[in-house]
Amino acid sequence: MISFSVNKRRVNVDVDPSTPLLWVLRENLELTGTKYGCGMAQCGACTVHIDGQAVRSCVAPVTRAAGKEVTTIEGLSPDLSHPLQRAWLEIDVPQCGYCQSGQIMSAAVLLNEIPNPTDEDIDQALTGNICRCGTYPRIRRAVHRAAEMMAKGGGR
Amino acid sequence: MNALRESRKPSFTGEVPRRDFLKLSVAASGGLLIGFYLPGMQPEAQAAAFAPNAFVRIGTDESVTVIVNHSEMGQGVFTALPMILADELDADWTKVRFEPAPVDPVYNHPVFKMQMTGGSTSTWSSFDQFRQAGAAARAMLITAAAQKWNVDPGTCRTENGAVIHSASNRRVSYGQLAESAAKITPPQQVTLKDPKDFKLIGKPLKRLDTPEKTNGKGIFGIDVKLPGMLTAVVARSPVFGGKVKSFNADKTKAMPGVRKVAEVPSGVAVIADGFWAAKRGRDALQIEWDEGPMADFNSKSQREQYVAMAKQPGLSARKEGDASGAIGSAARKIEAVYEVPYLSHAMMEPLNCAVDLRADRCEIWTGTQFQTVDHMSATRIAGLKPEQVQIHTTLLGGGFGRRANPASDFVSEAVHVAKAAGAPVKVIWTREDDMHGGFYRPMYYHSLIGGVDAEGNPLVWSHHVVGQSIVAGTPFESVIVKNGIDGTSVEGLDDIPYAIPNLNVEYHPAKVGVPVLWWRSVGHSHNAFVKESFIDELAALGGKDPFELRRRLLAKSPRDLGVLELAAEKAGWGKPLPAGRARGIAVHASFESYTAQVAEVSVDSGGKIRVHRVVCAVDCGRYVNPGIIEAQVQGAVIFGLTAAFYDELTFENGRIQQSNFHDYPMLRINETPEIEVHIVKNNEKSGGIGEPGVPCAAPAVANAIYAATGKRVRKLPIRMNEAV
């Protein structure tokens, strides 16, 4: 039995310890907002936070989460109120939408570390997240917009 | 898929396409509403009181649900089509919702006569249909209100989700009318709005599907979970056409979580409690394959075969003047060979399909672009009647053509697996499975000879195109292939708009056992690269400015010319650039839209190429949502740049050498240039927008590299760090 917290909820899972956290989240905990894209930490679609750090959950065995706090897109806010989600809505970022959970989760770590990022900071933080639809120009705008909202006190 | 649209409209009503090409059944404004109602359609039990036709439901809670018959794969149909219907309905946009359509002939593509999404056709093909659906509902709501007030319907008007009788200052909302409107007989004819009265169409409204794509709640095929569902992965032949000779599953069967191992036509399925158990179970399988005739296939010998083919006479796709005679009188000549590789669609969501197969029914959940074809395949494999099989279309995590497969590969296989599983099952393809699964953009080889006259004007263009047809061997072959020529193989070349007196284009269909398919922008994806690079070569050969030469040769093609001039103007063509930067230009028509792009590129001393800016002009005629157009074109440029710089599938011993994003990379945010999109506003007939942004990206960049370095890119991919 492996215990950790997901989106502030305590969970115990009985799975093979080698199982990647991604599949435990998606299949055992039914949190399907975190996506499978490559299975080798190349695309970032599976990005979640473990104790506030961005982690590619497709290659992280579930044991890596043991005793820690995991946050997924479902836990970022209950109501689309996180500045990044509000900015994503305002700029209308997603196309197919498949990679967007990962993009937002990577961006959330960036904004925690650098509240007012430059284009270069954004590029660096999101280089690990592929978007095949090519929403990058809007992602860049939306991250800047979210930073602005946070600076004006809309943050958390 | 332009070729599908132009006078070659296939009709699918059974296993084999009928050869009578039905005309668009929905007439223009005021036409009869034929084939508009879903047989036996019942309004949903809940709040939906009024379901006037198959495309809209209005609830007593004021909700307006638009049923969308095209799949949402990022291109915005869940927003654009509701906008069209809601505009005619005079609905309150804040109350408009969307819902994917079930599979039924009423939801067939109005032009292609089967339920499908592709060819950049969704918005224009459904434009009149969705207008009529909205207008019919509006007329019924007016009739209901007029009866309620006992007034002449002609004295009522509608606005923002309500019927208004100005004379008596009365107003009733659509939700309040829903129940009484449901009793009104649908009109046989409706009057559509004057386009000048459109309130939603033409505005950059926000997408309706953004919230569910921002909080993780949107359900893609891979997210589907059914009670008691198992998960399967399939071990498929490493070589196309290979078959299982024998296999040993002892180790697999002993592994925790593995429920069953079964041979299916495509390979060996490992059916387990979850993905990880299935995948580990598959890793432990021992399979001996009969690799078949492709066992020794490799890219090098395939290329040699294409080189030889290009030297033979091909099938004539275009002939103007006398190219072979004129080449002798050219003042200067140039010969060039262009090559592009096999490409994977590489949607972010790998293929998957969930199936619940019972004795008397089969339900399927998947992100498909090809409902009618998949439904036929599933029905046949399940051994059921068509009405016993239903496909629920989920969100698609990208499509780009891969999920529109005449062979129904991922759906057919999943039904076979479900037969073996004896329980609801979801087949998940790993990224490697998806990349090795075939149905690629074909490899193409182009050889050209061109010449200019003494004044430097293009005199002759002779062109041989070698590559696989994407429709050969499919039910589409009989309708798309004409005189041996697959129109999609030469699209963009058989209609070169440049005024060159001697033009010759010949096609050489190659028969190769690699499954190929339409890939975002189809034949234009390679033909535009060659056409727009080679016209640049002719400009250089004749000492002409590449923009000015195109401009002159397009004098009689006003829409090509319009986007060319707009892109050049917005990009500041001819104006000084920062040191080390150069511009390249390309213009191309596809899917009945016109695009031009100017790329600004620098190449450093180490040969590292950087694309700084891409300026796009697009003319897609009358449009619905310019915000979505901007996003589609930006995304298409990035898609085109990915192919230009990175992607290539190669074969060795019948096996593809690439497997995942580490060796089949995608353009990333740090490599993404500034991309400006300028949309031409006019009232021309609508064209597509999902694909037309792709073709110009590679040649605009290649031409800029030439301008910067004097070196011509004739083979894709050019790699970012590779010295040119």
Image (cartoon, grey):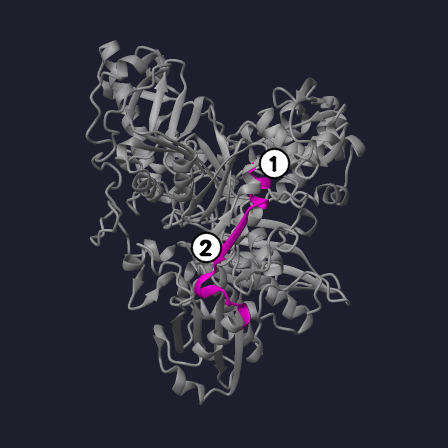
Q: Is residue B457 left or right of residue B415?
A: right
Q: Nearer the viewer, residue B554 or B347?
A: B347
Could you classify mark 2 by the number of other residues whose Cα lies within 10 Å: few (under 14), some (14-19), or many (20 or more)?
Answer: few
The residue where tag 1 is placed is: A100
Residue at left offset 30%, top offset 47%: B112
**On the same chain: label 1 and label 2?**
no
- In the image, B190 versus B418, the foreground residue is B418
Q: What's the magenta region?
A: B278-300
- Tell me the residue that label 2 is attached to: B245
Can you name the residue that lies furthest to the right here?
Answer: A113
Question: Does residue B480 sit above or below B44 in this rendering?
Answer: below
* Residue B193 visible in the snapshot: no
User: Between tags 1 and 2, which lies in front?
Assistant: 2
Q: Residue furthest bottom?
A: B328
Q: Is residue B398 above or below residue B180?
A: below
Callout 2 amino acid: Lys
